[in-house]
Image (tube, rainbow, N blue to C red):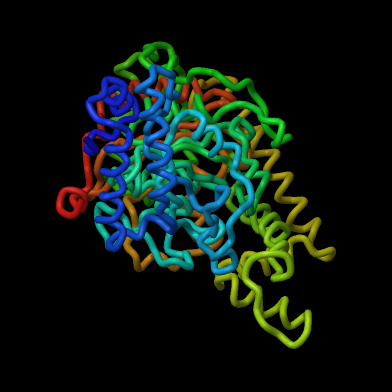
């Protein structure tokens, strides 16, 4: 029952009582147990919560009540999303034993929709990374080839979905952290418009850049999840948009007349030939479906990565300063207060997190504030203006999600700005707060490759419509990594 992990199909079978939510949950828990040693996908598994959730769904179905649009669907959360009574570690020693007293708004919405929580997923520590190797709990490899990276920081979320350990994962994306792993692992990953999905209860490092978004095996599942997650909430003053929109209603419509721009700045001269061939094939398919495809320009793309790194490091420094060993989290023993601060932060944070904080301290210092932080914000405005000009002419923008297949583990030491420079097509959408989606478009060097689509603010409908139209031709959700067939 797990090989076809499409949410729509599983819900149909559950409602027809082909199997129960409890049976599906037990099958998922068995799959998690079989793959955990080799993939290290979960930091915390929650079998008691999962089975209680599943039995509640079965009871509602039995008595004829509406069990919710995600009834019985196994879900997992990136471990920086708070869950009351279930530890939330951010993959850091600093929060290794932290159990939050409340749950994130997004998780509460999933529960009310009938979703079943399987557990909390591995990640790069505090979401700062692109490899899913920078975790206190160890790395998560790519399930298609364990010598390759899964991408980060929501790498385990993508791994959990493509290996059918869950049917829906919720990740966070401050600079490609949902979309890059989605491309590397071969799933659909959506970063909604900034503020469309509440982030209250997300442990944020860079609040002005953070988005919560779903990862699923197909576009229909992503649309169904967004229908549950989207809409403003009183607990989150940055949210906007009315709840209750059915994003699946956009699917199945033709895309004739759709204008698609291809930013030349996103087409790296070092792009892998197979990735380029897949991208060209995707563009040709869009044309066959009636879309108009033209080259365009986003001239400030070259500055976006540096601006992103300045802003994200400054915000990370500010937010992570809360973890000082005084109120909660890891606390080192020391002779006096200042020593306790130093030892706590050295023991609790990895070297990469400390590097980000040092740089954040620099760019916010009085001597360098204007030189770095203020200039970065001005570049951010220019990036937004580039998108405004592009969307005056186009409905969507398209590029490869990543210019190469998943890199080998040997490249995992790429950190900071060097790694972010590989993400030229991903970072600008976060600076501008725009919706973006990665759709599997095939295999390059026998590894998944993704198509990146960016829409205007609150353009999720047209984004999902175009992705769904392409997916009908590609049908990547039918592919399952060999490790599942041999070990799961």
Q: Quadrant of residue 438?
A: top left
Residue lying at the far bottom of the rendered structure: 335
Specify whether 266 is left or right of 434. left
Q: Work out which quarter of the rendered image holds the N terminus and state it.
A: top left
Depth check, front residue: 181 or 303: 181
Residue 98 x %, y % = 59, 61
Residue 22 x %, y % = 32, 37
Using the image, determine if residue 426 lies above or below residue 147: above
Residue 183 x %, y % = 37, 44
Total numbered circles: 0
Using the image, determine if residue 342 lies above or below residue 410: below
**Does the rendering let one see residue 284?**
no
Depth check, front residue: 297 or 319: 319
Residue 393 x %, y % = 55, 20
Q: Residue at x 47, y 27 (%)?
A: 261
Q: Residue at x 65, y 74 (%)?
A: 331
Q: Residue at x 37, y 39 (%)?
A: 74
Using the image, determine if residue 178 lies above or below residue 222: below
Residue lying at the far right of the rendered structure: 366
Q: Residue at x 43, y 59 (%)?
A: 43
Q: Quadrant of residue 138?
A: bottom left
């Amino acid at each position: 029952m797990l090989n076809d992990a499409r949410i729509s199909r599983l819900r149909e079978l559950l409602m027809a009582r082909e199997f129960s939510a409890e049976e599906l949950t037990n099958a998922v828990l068995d799959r998690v147990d079989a793959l955990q040693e080799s993939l290290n996908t979960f930091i915390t598994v929650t079998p008691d919560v999962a089975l209680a959730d599943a039995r509640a769904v079965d009871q509602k179905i039995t008595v004829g009540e509406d069990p919710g649009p995600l009834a019985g669907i196994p879900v997992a959360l990136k471990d920086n999303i708070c869950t009351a009574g279930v530890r939330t570690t951010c993959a850091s020693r600093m929060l290794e034993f932290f159990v939050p007293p409340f749950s994130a708004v997004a998780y509460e919405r999933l529960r009310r929709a009938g979703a079943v929580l399987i557990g909390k997923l591995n990640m790069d520590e505090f979401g700062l990374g692109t490899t899913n190797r920078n975790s206190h709990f160890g790395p998560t490899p790519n399930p298609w080839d364990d010598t390759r990276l899964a991408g980060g920081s929501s790498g385990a979320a993508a791994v959990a979905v493509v290996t059918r350990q869950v049917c829906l994962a919720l990740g966070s994306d401050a600079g490609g952290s949902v979309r890059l792993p989605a491309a590397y692992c071969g799933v659909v990953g959506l970063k909604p418009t900034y503020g469309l999905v509440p982030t209250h209860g997300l442990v944020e490092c860079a609040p002005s850049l953070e988005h919560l978004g779903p990862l699923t095996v197909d576009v229909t599942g992503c649309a169904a999840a967004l229908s549950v997650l989207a809409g403003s909430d009183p607990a989150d003053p940055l949210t906007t948009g009315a709840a209750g929109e059915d994003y699946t209603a956009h699917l199945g419509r033709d895309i004739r007349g759709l204008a698609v721009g291809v930013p030349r700045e996103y087409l790296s001269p070092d792009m892998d030939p197979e990735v380029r061939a897949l991208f060209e094939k995707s563009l040709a398919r869009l044309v066959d479906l009636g879309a108009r495809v033209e080259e365009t320009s986003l001239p400030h793309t070259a500055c976006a990565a540096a601006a992103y790194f300045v802003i994200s490091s400054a915000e990370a420094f500010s937010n992570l300063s809360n973890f000082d060993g005084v109120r909660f989290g890891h606390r080192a023993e020391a002779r006096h207060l200042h020593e306790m601060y130093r030892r706590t932060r050295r023991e609790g944070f990895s070297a990469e997190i400390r590097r980000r904080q040092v740089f954040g301290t620099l760019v916010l210092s009085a001597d360098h504030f204007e030189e770095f932080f203020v200039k970065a914000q001005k570049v951010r405005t220019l990036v937004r203006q580039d998108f405004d000009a592009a969307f005056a002419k186009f409905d969507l923008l398209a590029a490869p999600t990543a210019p190469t297949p998943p890199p080998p583990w040997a490249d995992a030491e790429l950190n900071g700005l060097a790694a972010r420079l590989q993400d030229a097509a991903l970072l600008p959408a976060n600076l501008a707060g725009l919706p973006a989606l990665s759709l599997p478009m095939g295999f390059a060097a026998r590894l998944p490759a993704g198509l990146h689509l960016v829409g205007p603010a609150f353009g999720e409908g047209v984004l999902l419509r175009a992705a769904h139209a392409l997916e009908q031709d590609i049908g990547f959700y039918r592919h399952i990594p060999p490790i599942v067939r041999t070990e799961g």
